Image (spheres, helix red, strand yellow):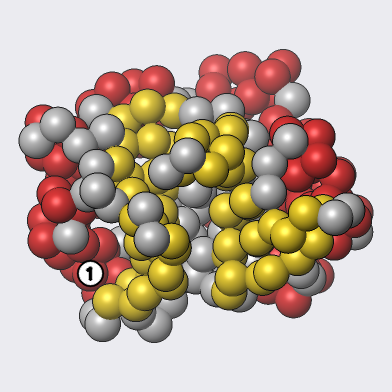
Amino acid sequence: MTVLFISDLHLSPTHPEITQCFLRFLKEDAPKASALYVLGDLFESWIGDDDGTPLQIEVADAFKALSDLGIPIYFIHGNRDFLVGKQFAKASGMTLLPEHQVIDLFGKPTLIMHGDTLCIQDEGYQRYRKKVHNPLIQWLFFRLPLSVRRRIGEKIRAGSTKSNMEKSEDIMDVDQSEVLRVMKDSDVTQLIHGHTHRPDIHDIRLGNDPAQRIVLGDWYTQGSVLVCTEEGCTLQTRAF
Ligand code: OKV
Ligand code: MN
């Protein structure tokens, strides 16, 4: 029994080598697992399930093939693909989870999330996040034609590359007191998240209890997978 976790692939048509590595992972590794968790930023951008780009269709079909083998696939939104919706989830055979979820990982209650909500000291990003997560703003955004949503996405991405928004996403790390707060709040001693692109297994303390914070890696230069069994969890890589 193996449970796999991935995040931060940032799939985009401009980096086919990442997509190829991911599709190989779905074909060769994932069928041997008992579950696959995708903890956000699977895609570099997402402006609606109705976009239907070749990349999105290719990924949905590959997920669906895995799901049809009986492997459950769970998805938590990242800061990039927070608009992934029910239509794409259904086409992929995956289950959308809320932004924070406690799962039973081989008997150990484990909190899973993308990780952007832990970076509370990045106030500029948190302000932007509040706006684009506002249901009314999302409702309005979805009313817009695809062509307009595409143009807005390009504009925001171009602006973000220039501003400190992009910088802070890479440079800033999680807030340690926020980590302890969410773990105590969910009553867990294990947390798994991505977003910071700093893969590591941190041994921490929650009061008197030893605890672990596991950080998933990105897929910029290689695949990055957290492999968990009864024995424990190991961070692994997959060459492109
Ligand atoms: C996603 C990020 C671009 C970071 C816009 C309302 C607005 C949604 C949106 C547009 C952008 C997602 C959906 C994208 C994440 C960026 C740049 C930086 C740090 C509105 C609702 F503006 F009209 F109100 N967006 N896209 N960034 O291109 O996928 O997370 S995106
Ligand atoms: Mn992220």
Most extreme residue toward the front is 208
Residue 47 located left or right of residue 53 = right
How many tags in the picture? 1
Q: Is mark 1 on a helix, strand or loop?
A: helix
Instruction: Tell me if mark 1 has few (under 14), some (14-19) or many (20+) residues whose alpha carbon lies within 10 angstroms of its own.
Output: some
The residue carrying mark 1 is 21
Q: In this view, does 156 lie to the left or right of 209?
A: left
Compared with 81, 160 (above or below) is below
At a point 68% along the width and 41% down the height, the residue shown is 188
Q: Is residue 54 visible?
A: no
Q: In which quarter of the image is residue 23?
A: bottom left
Whether 53 is drawn above or below 70: the answer is: below
Q: Where is residue 137 in the image (x, y as percent from the top left)?
A: 71, 24
Q: Does residue 186 appear in this view?
A: yes
Report x, y in % for residue 6.
41, 57
Residue 36's x, y, as percent?
32, 45
* Front in this rendered view, residue 166 or 178: 178
Instruction: Point out residue 33 in the picture as x, y percentages from the top left corner.
Output: 22, 49
Task: State the residue in front, 228 or 117.
Answer: 228
Tell me the quarter of the image containing the C terminus. Answer: bottom left
Q: Which of 130 and 13 is in front in this view?
A: 130
- Residue drawn at x 59%, y 54% is 193
- Residue 22 to residue 184: above or below: below
The amino acid type of the residue labelled 1 equals Cys
Q: Residue at x 26, y 82 (%)?
A: 239
Q: Residue at x 75, y 44 (%)?
A: 183
Q: Is residue 35 left or right of residue 129?
A: left
Q: Which of 220 and 202 is in front in this view?
A: 202
Q: Does the residue labelled 1 lie within 8 Å of ligand 2?
A: no
Quarter residue 162 falls in? bottom right
